[in-house]
Amino acid sequence: GENVEQHPSTLSVQEGDSAVIKCTYSDSASNYFPWYKQELGKRPQLIIDIRSNVGEKKDQRIAVTLNKTAKHFSLHITETQPEDSAVYFCAANQAGTALIFGKGTTLSVSS
Amino acid sequence: DAGVIQSPRHEVTEMGQEVTLRCKPISGHNSLFWYRQTMMRGLELLIYFNNNVPIDDSGMPEDRFSAKMPNASFSTLKIQPSEPRDSAVYFCASSLGTRSQETQYFGPGTRLLVL
């Protein structure tokens, strides 16, 4: 089955800096890669996703890149703000199978 | 839309007791997921349903856990008997499609503490 590894487990940046979170997956058949954000005490919420037919996707300050050959994908947050502080989860699957989540990255943005 | 509704929001029980968690998915959604979240193990999928039918229950820890979805608007996760290691936040989520590649909308979670 699929296995998703996520790094780093914690990340501290200064406001305005960029943050990068990386994930690797094991199943080459996986073709869907979402990212969820969970603020402290709240529920996870989808912030961006990418499918295997594209290599990059952007939404304002957030971007995700995918390298299918290397089986890794990354979340990039530019111009970080204190409200970006949260736990970020990557996930992967192929259609019709369970979505497998990474262990999460706790991002702290200090002002 | 009220979103995914879970009850209770908090549950404190003693080891050996039966615990029932409830979930009402978003109306019109066809898939429902039960997750468990702990610091040590992260976010784990326990079971998911498509159109009320269980599809993958490989994440259910053991026979003490059971889940049902008697209709499109209600699901339960039962733990009997409960153990201290079951203490966690349990999330229910629903999605519109059935491919597990659509946005999952999570409920607020049930924080379970087993003493």
Image (tube, coloured by chain):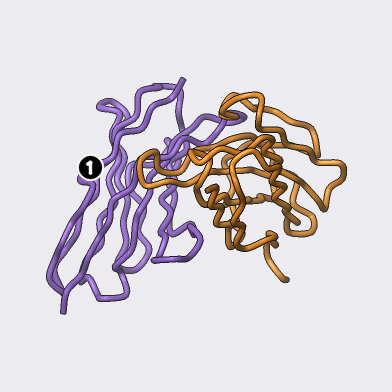
Chain colours: A purple, B orange
Quarter where residue A3 is shown? top left
Q: Quadrant of the C terminus of chain A?
A: bottom left
Question: Residue A87: percent from the left, percent from the top?
Answer: 34, 57
Q: Nearer the viewer, residue B10 or A40?
A: B10
Q: What's the residue type where badge 1 is placed?
A: His
Q: Nearer the viewer, residue B8 or B18?
A: B18
Question: Residue B93: percent from the left, percent from the top?
Answer: 62, 51
Residue at 58% across, 63% down: B108
Quarter where residue B25 is shown? bottom right
Q: Disc 1 sits on a residue from what chain?
A: A
Q: Is residue A34 above or below residue A14?
A: above
Q: Nearer the viewer, residue B54 or B17?
A: B17
Q: Is residue B92 above or below residue A32?
A: below
Quarter where residue B40 is shown? top left
Horizontal arrangement in the rendering, residue B84 relative to residue A70 (left or right): right
Residue at 25% across, 56% down: A76
**Dot 1 crowding, Cα within 10 Å, few <14, some 14–19, many 20+:** some
The residue wearing badge 1 is A7
Question: Residue B112: percent from the left, percent from the top?
Answer: 56, 52
Question: Residue A24: percent from the left, percent from the top?
Answer: 29, 33
Horizontal arrangement in the rendering, residue B7 relative to residue A81 (left or right): right
